[in-house]
Image (spheres, rainbow, N blue to C red):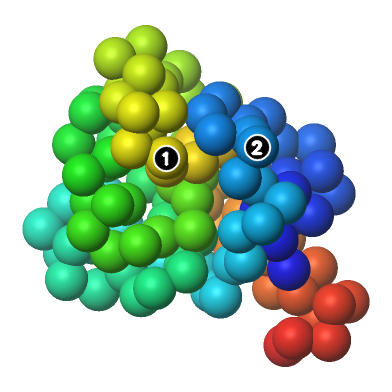
Amino acid sequence: MTVKDFVQHFGYKILSCADKADKTEITGVYICDLLSMAMARVKDGELWVTVHTNINIVAVACLTNASCIVIPENIEVEELTINKAVEKGVIIVQAPHTGYEICINFYTKNLEFGDG
C-alpha cells in the first residue's frame, strides 16, 4: 500500500512532500521515540511513528529510508522541521490517532490490500 492510500483511507494529513505519497510504498510500521534506536531499527520503507517533531526526525528518516514519518495525536510539527522535510524529500503525516491505533489501522488496511 502507498502512503497516499493509507493517509486517504484514515483521513490523515500530509504535511510535506504530498507529491511523493502516491509513489511511496509502506513495507511495515515501527514505533519509537528514541532517535538512536529508530536510526538502528527502522527498516527500508517502514512507516515510522514518533511523537518527536524537531528537525532531527528528518535526518533519521533519511538515514533509514523510512517511507514516511507519522506524528500521532495531532501533535503540531515545527515549521523548521516541515521545511527541512520538504528540502530532503521526507513525507511527514499528522494523525489524530495514537501510535497503537495507527499500527492497528495500517495492519487492518494492509490485510485488505492482500499484503498481510
Residue pointed to by mark 1: 89
Residue drawn at x 31%, y 52% is 61
Location of residue 29 in the rendering, given as x and y in whole percent from the top left corner: 50, 68
Q: Helix, strand or loop at disc 2?
A: helix
- As drawn, is 64 to the left or to the right of 22? left
Mark 2 to mark 1 CA distance (whole Å): 10 Å
Q: Nearer the viewer, residue 65 or 115?
A: 65
Residue drawn at x 54%, y 74% is 28
Quadrant in the rendering for residue 88 = top left
Please give the label number shown on residue 61: none
Label 2, residues with CA under 10 Å away: few <14, some 14-19, many ≥20: few
Please give the label number shown on residue 19: 2
Look at label 2 and name its amino acid: Asp
Q: Nearer the viewer, residue 98 or 45?
A: 45
Residue drawn at x 35%, y 28% is 87
Location of residue 4 in the rendering, given as x and y in whole percent from the top left corner: 73, 49
What residue occupies the far top of the structure in this picture? 79
Quadrant in the rendering for residue 54 = top left
- As drawn, is 8 to the left or to the right of 60? right
Q: Is residue 45 above or below residue 22?
A: below
Look at label 1 and name its amino acid: Gly
Label 1, residues with CA under 10 Å away: few <14, some 14-19, many ≥20: some
- As drawn, is 71 to the left or to the right of 105? left
Location of residue 67 in the rendering, given as x and y in whole percent from the top left corner: 49, 58
Q: Disc 2, disc 1: CB below 8 Å?
A: no
User: Is residue 101 something that shows in the picture?
Assistant: no
